[in-house]
Amino acid sequence: MLKIILLTHSREMDRANNTGQLVKHVLGDSARVVEWHRKHPDAELLAAIEAGLVGLVFPSNDESISEKVSEIPKRLLYLVIIDATWQEARKMYNQSPYLKALPKVSLVSAPKSIYPLRRNQIEGGLCTAECVIHLLTESENVIEAQQLSQLLMTFIGIEASVLTGNKR
């Protein structure tokens, strides 16, 4: 099972529209929420990074710096997803040298976001739950991907047929 570390901005912890909570609900112990602190990074996360066990899910059009999810080296046990608004995520990344040094994993052929609850989204950007759904699907954890997808649809009030493109 794919293990996810949600590196979460402190403001996200109390936001009602945070989809990281859905990820934790579906994945249980396979997802760990780590609150980001610029000056005091999580010791357990740093230890896993130093051991070479962590990759960072990173939006990129530059295929040369990224690996496909299906090609993640066996040595990577965890994938970090920055759980924040896009503006906060950029700041977190820029202020965390340990994130910049991680192997980057990008989502290939990710679908367009259906998450309508935030403004100022970047083109091609996904919410945290959508990102994890795509990662789970790519890594053949289909049951968990379906569970998370259904939970996200309920969370934002969209019927399954809208997401899948199926007509009734």
Image: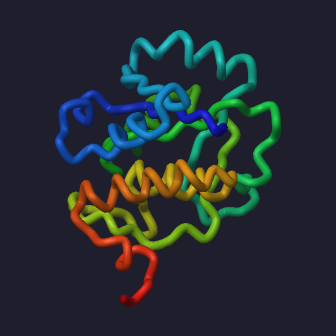
**Compared to 163, does 35 lie above or below?**
above
Quadrant of the image for the N terminus? top right
Q: Is residue 66 visible?
A: no
* Left/right of residue 168 with respect to residue 101 in the rendered view: left
Residue 6 image offset from top left, x and y in percent: 45, 34
Is residue 128 found left or right of 30 in the rendered image? left
Is residue 115 found left or right of 81 in the rendered image? left
Residue 146 screen position, x and y as percent = 49, 57
Residue 21 in view (yes/no): yes
Quadrant of the image occupied by residue 33: top left
- Relative image position of residue 76 (x, y in whole percent): 74, 33
Residue at 45%, 52% in the rendered image:
147
Q: Residue at x 47, y 38 (%)?
A: 93
How many numbered marks have been drawn onto this rendered protein structure? 0
Give percent across and percent down for residue 109: 61, 71
Q: Residue at x 37, y 71 (%)?
A: 160
- Closest to the observer: 134 or 168? 168
Quarter of the image with the C terminus in it:
bottom left
Residue at point 56%, 19% (across, down): 45
